[in-house]
Each structure stands twice: as C-alpha cells, then as structure tokens.
Amino acid sequence: MPVFTNPSQGTQEETDAYVQALLGLLGDQDPLAVLERFPQDVRRTAAGLSDAQLRTPEAPGKWSIVEVLQHLADAELVWSVRVRMALGEDAPPLTGYDQDAWATRLRYRDASPEDALALLEVLRAFNLRLLRSLTPEEWRRVAVHEERGEESVEHMARLYAGHDLVHLRQLRRIRDAAF
C-alpha cells in the first residue's frame, strides 16, 4: 500500500507511516498558510478542464479529479466536526472512515465539481477563522481517534495541511497524466 494512502482498516504500522508521511510532507511549513492557500491551488489546478476531463480517472481503479474534489469537500466536513469535538468536549472519541467506501456509496463520480469546490472553500474559510481565534490552551485540546490515538487540535491542523499537499500533488498528477 502506498504510504500516502489512508488505511481505513490498516495495521498500526501502516497508520503510523501514513501520519509520518503527511507530517514529513508538511515539514516546517506553516500549516495555517498551507490550509489557507489550498482551495485556490485546487481551483487553479482544475481550471480550464472540460467535464469529461474532470471525470476521467488517472488509471483504472483510481480516482478522477471530480472524485478527489468531492473527497476534499467531505474530508473538510469531517475535519470540521473533529476540531469542534476536540474543542467542545473533553477527549471525545473520533471514528475513522473508509474514504473508498464513501467515494462509492456517496457517488463521488457523479459529483458537481463546482459544488465540491464551493463547499471546500466555504468550510475551509470557517475552519480557518476558528483556528485563528484559538488560545494556546485550545490548540492543545485533544480528541481520541480510534485508529491514531490522542490528537491535539494543533496536530490535526498539521495532518490536514499534509493531507492538502498530498491531494494537490494527486490532482496535478491526474491532470498532467491525462491531458
């Protein structure tokens, strides 16, 4: 399994490797800066492509750009809830989810690219506004992920910034490979 694949039912070793890969990709970049510029980077990457191009997968069994866009919108929804759970409750449990099952069952293939981008942009703006308002103590508040264990809000922000970078690479690779 590639290291940047999020294992929904993976081993602890695979989960740890995924987390370290995301954090390694982020490196010493400011996570808030990465999170802020991401929606515009995604929009630029998808700009000018036809509907057919947006729906063409990179390879058999792989996602198309529109599927990645819908995944990003749904991931932002999940992250919104996770951060709010950590801030509003004391060490709440967080469940994982199978992104491939969501893609199939929620019909990512049929998504509206513009709607997915708009949802990502609106949610990201609200999430950034919340994050920028946090005190140092609030950044340290934690939730307990069922696969990854205890995660602070700060750690979640770093993971999602790394997640952004992985998917920006993926979107560019799909675009460049097919067109």
Image (cartoon, grey):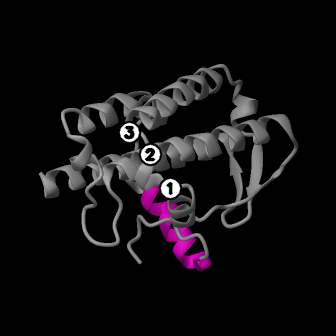
Residue 166 location in percent, x, y?
Answer: 37, 52
Few, some or many C-alpha atoms within 10 Å of disc 1 (few <14, some 14-19, many ≥20)?
few
Amino acid of disc 2 = Ala
Q: What residue is rendered at 56% in x and 55% in y?
A: 106
Which residue in the structure is indicated by mark 1? 107
Q: Residue furthest right?
A: 90
Which residue in the structure is indicated by mark 3? 113
Please state the extent of the stretch shown in magenta in the rendering. 10-22
Counting every numbered tag in the picture gives 3
Q: Is residue 62 left or right of residue 143?
A: left
Which residue in the structure is indicated by mark 2? 111
Along the line of sight, the residue nearer the viewer: 95 or 99: 99
Along the line of sight, the residue nearer the viewer: 155 or 147: 147
Q: Is residue 57 left or right of residue 73?
A: left
> Which quadrant holds residue 130?
top right
Q: Is residue 19 magenta?
A: yes
Amino acid of disc 3 = Pro
Q: What residue is rendered at 71% in x and 24% in y?
A: 135
- Marks 1 and 3: CB-CB under 8 Å? no
- Give the main secondary structure of the magenta stretch: helix
> How far apart are labels 1 and 2 at the CA level?
7 Å
Residue 56 location in percent, x, y?
Answer: 25, 56
> How far apart are labels 1 and 3 at the CA level?
13 Å
Q: Is residue 42 left or right of residue 129?
A: left
Secondary structure state at the residue bearing disc 3: helix
